Amino acid sequence: MALEQTWRWFGPNDPVSLQDIRQAGATGIVTALHHIPNGQVWEIADIQERKSIIEAAGLTWSVVESVPVHEAIKTRTGDFETYVQNYQQTLRNLGQCGIDTVCYNFMPILDWTRTDLDAPMKDGSTGLRFDATHFAAFDLYLLNRPEAAALYTEEQKSAAKAWLDGASEADIHKLVRNIIAGLPGSEESFTIEEFRKVLETYNNVGDLELRTNLYQFIQAIGPVAAEAGVRLSIHPDDPPYPILGLPRVVSTENDAQMLLDAFDHQANGICFCTGSYGVRPDNDLPGMVTRLGSRIHFIHLRATKREPDGSFYEADHLDGDVDMYSVMKALVAEQKKRQEAGRTDLRMPFRPDHGHRMLDDLSATKRTNPGYTAIGRLRGLAELRGLEYGIERAAQTH
Ligand code: DNO
Ligand code: MN
């Protein structure tokens, strides 16, 4: 099949092993050197060491997700110039080791955000959920920021208050932890006091400033990536709209297009995450693949289901609001286009982005990372692989 099947692996401590991943049928690994502090150069020896472990298991290191972007770069303060130089050096080192696809994101402070990591699904499995009311309760009454009042309607405020009045200590503790203690792959983790303080670092960084900082960053690292033979791919905001009064600048097709235009080169690309972009009904996902396709270097496939109050949850891969059939069809068409154009950067790696906690993973002693379960992702990959296979075979017989 045309698209490369990959799997996120958090490194040697991940309860899901490289052998497990082989049995899931993935051939490419998506990983990062999470032990290197954010902002420091990834040395060649460290990259090689990880690469050898992956290759010894009969797999390849397909994508780096992520080389994290230091907060100083996002706010363009402090030592940001040093961090940009370090980022450039990391890209050169990765290129030298033959690793050519790098994912990153530009979400302020928090990486992706959920309120519930074990929301019960109808079939008895559990999944990740963003509950708009619980999130408002956190922002309005637990974080207790005076500025928050202006961000919510009266109806949202009373719903949040009502939830909080009925919530137990444990519910509240869990909510706070889920939001600010850092989800898998995010580099930061805070206490509520720390979090209040760190929010202030964005007092002078609104939408325009964050955009400018992102475009200046891509103009600084893009040419280095191009020279090193590395394809950059930015992960969209998750959820794809501003939260906590913080700006979000990679949430729509227009945002992606503006970033691509800021450094108009093949090396400056996007990670097409259907679960993130798909939370907005105004994002036309298959259309985005058709229009932005030549610059999609990495793909996350999963479906979210939206609810009327702005909440959403992670549904099964072929369920939910994402039209996965049309997305896959457009991706297969893009892959064909690349082949026909004789492009050297043919590879279009996708991974099943998250899966439910189900079957043995529900009771496993070695608990897998939220969203990054073994069996739920195995199911997701199998469904997506079957979908791709069907689309390709149908195209051949017509
Ligand atoms: C959300 C997930 C996240 C994401 C990282 C991006 O959609 O895919 O784990 O990959 O936040 O770096
Ligand atoms: Mn994603």
Image (cartoon, helix red, strand yellow):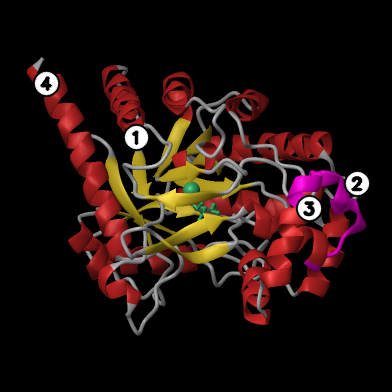
Q: CA distance from mark 1 to mark 2?
A: 39 Å
User: Which range is magenta?
Assistant: 142-157
Q: Which mark is residue 157?
A: 3
Pair 3/1: label in front:
3
Q: Which mark is residue 382?
A: none
Amino acid at dot 4: Gln
Q: Where is mark 4, residue-wise?
A: 396
Q: Where is mark 1, residue-wise?
A: 324
Camera-side residue: 394 or 2? 394
The location of residue 308, given as percent across then percent down, is 57, 40
Check contact, mark 4 vs mark 3: CB within 8 A.
Answer: no
Residue 44 shows in this picture:
yes
Residue placed furthest toward the bottom: 365
Amino acid at dot 2: Asn
Tell me if residue 334 comes above or below residue 130 in the rendering. Answer: above
Query: Callout 1: helix, strand or loop?
Result: helix
Q: Is residue 2 left or right of residue 169?
A: left
Disc with the residue nearer the chain's start (4 vs 2)? 2
Amino acid at dot 1: Met
Q: Is residue 189 left or right of residue 200?
A: left
